[in-house]
Amino acid sequence: MRTPSETGDEPVVRMRGVHKAFGSKQILRGLDLEVRSGRTLAIMGGSGTGKSVALRHVIGLMEPDAGSIEVFGQDLATVGPAGLARLRERMGYVFQEGALVGWMNIHDNLALPLREREGLSEAEVRPRVEEAMERVHVEGAGAKFPSEISGGMKKRVGVARALITRPELVLYDEPNAGLDPEISRSINDLIREVSDTLGVTALVVEHRVECIERVADEVLFLHEGRAHVHAPTAEFFASQDPRLRAFLGPSSTAPSITSS
Amino acid sequence: MFALLDPVPSWWPPLLGLLFAGGVAHLLWTSAGPRALLEEAGGRVALAVAVAARLPHLARRRSWVARQTYGAAVGNLHVILLVGVFIGMIFALQTGIELARFGQQDQIGPLVAAGLAREMGPFITALVLASTYGSALAAEMGTMAVSDELTALEVMSIDRVSLLVLPRVVALAIVCPAMTVICDTIGIIGGGFVASAQLGVGWDLYIDTSLSALAGLGEGVPLPKDVFGGLFKAFWFGATVGVISCASGIAARGGALGVGRATSRAVRDATIAVIVANYFLTWLLYR
């Protein structure tokens, strides 16, 4: 396995030898990965290889059977529920389908973490919500309910909700799933813009090459529960690793791919 | 037929034991096993404790409590009215026919009033709320669970019990006694129709005897004992239905099928819990 060059920064996320099984099915078999501050790492791999499982471990929704996970330098196994809640306050999570609360309108969905977690007044909440809606280009949709907006808008609002508390680390779970190419491009541009302008660290689970090319600084190819290839984006797509080539197919060999 | 059971034959207690054991075996067979059953029961008790611990949040949640209370009350008022009036009519007819054989029709009012206030009003109201509002709560929570909405709240470090469960449980604990009062009232009126139209009891006599049966104040309570007892039961029934419905929904897994199972389980378990709680509350109040 190859690893990206060291940048000297302390990793924001570090997974070491993580194993996870569901019943008799072993999903992760010693996964190692690191994401450094301000960088965007994409995890790529086939269906059922444990990409989303890895992401859920990072935010403490799942506990590994073996191995360790450190986020912001703290071992998740030892932080306890209160410590995990504090760590989560520094993170944002974008779900595949947005996971917006169905009985709240878009404004209230975005305001939810500000009201519930940060205890802000309505006067403080309103401009933050408006700013977030503007950032993801859904101005004017505040009074609508999630069932009244398109899948692409739900994703955008999901991104806005993850960012509204100004997190240091954002986790994206298949941000392009179920979207047409045009909306996918706009979501990818949004993720890149967020990383560039806000300087957040990001972990993106994705299997679409065009998304990864656009958003990732480095890419990890997950195969049989392990990091099979981990390299800067341009180097990753130029790799001649047979397993990776078999996964990417003949259309993804173009050497013109550039890292953002 | 009952003469066959006098005296109680020796095979009767073992038969009852066998039926009970059969019921327990069926419950274990249809569930995922005794351990899963215990975990499920433990989860519900833990949720009830978590709700109780968050009662100080009520002031902050008052608008959500008001919304849920309004939804539960207004959405089910017609059901309670319809069920209540027919329960009163059935009760009056059943007791009236027997009492008429002994020329005691004027006792229909007290029997219907006391029966509804003590037992049938809170019990029927709780069952109606479990099957209508409770099932809707379980489906709502279940849908939130399978669509990652609950997980989203968890990763945002938002207290889901305080935000979602507390207002719903409190709303049911408010609505169930309020609906019980309506059920009792409309049931007594329904019983009066039957008593006056079919059993020859004057309306005035029926109402007078009904009200006088409920008039005696209970010891240490500001209400007639039967009314207080019924409302006390209704409060606990409402809270029980709320906790079980929310817990079933939160535990839902596996898409639409899982939501359907959670909804069905919520109604089944809330019904059983209300019946069991009814016995113990009756014992507590009237021993």
Image (cartoon, helix red, strand yellow):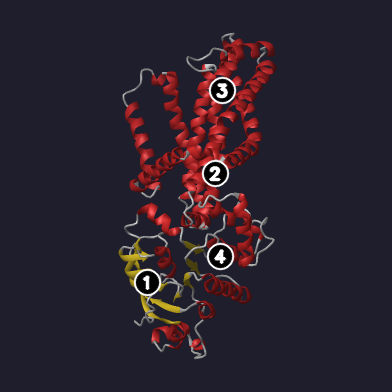
Q: What's the chain of the residue with tag 1?
A: A
The residue shown at (55%, 63%) is A97
- Tell me how far mark 4 sits from mark 3, CA to CA: 54 Å
Category of crowding for the residue at label 2, using alpha-carbon neighbours closer than 10 angstroms: few (below 14), some (14–19), many (at least 20): many
Same chain for labels 3 and 1? Say yes or no. Answer: no
Residue to which mark 4 is pinned: A159
* Residue wearing tag 1: A10
Give the alpha-carbon distance from disc 4 to disc 2, as whole Å: 32 Å
Dot 1 crowding, Cα within 10 Å, few <14, some 14–19, many 20+: some
Percent across and percent down for residue B97 are 59, 17
In this rendering, the label closer to the viewer, 4 or 3: 4
- Helix, strand or loop at mark 1: loop
Vertical placement of residue B82 versus B41, above or below: above
> Between marks 1 and 2, how big is the CA–CA gap?
50 Å
Q: Residue at x 33, y 47 (%)?
A: B35
In the image, are marks 3 and 2 on the same chain? yes
Nearer to me, B103 or B212: B212
Tag 3–tag 2 contact (CB < 8 Å): no
Q: Which residue is mark 2?
A: B135
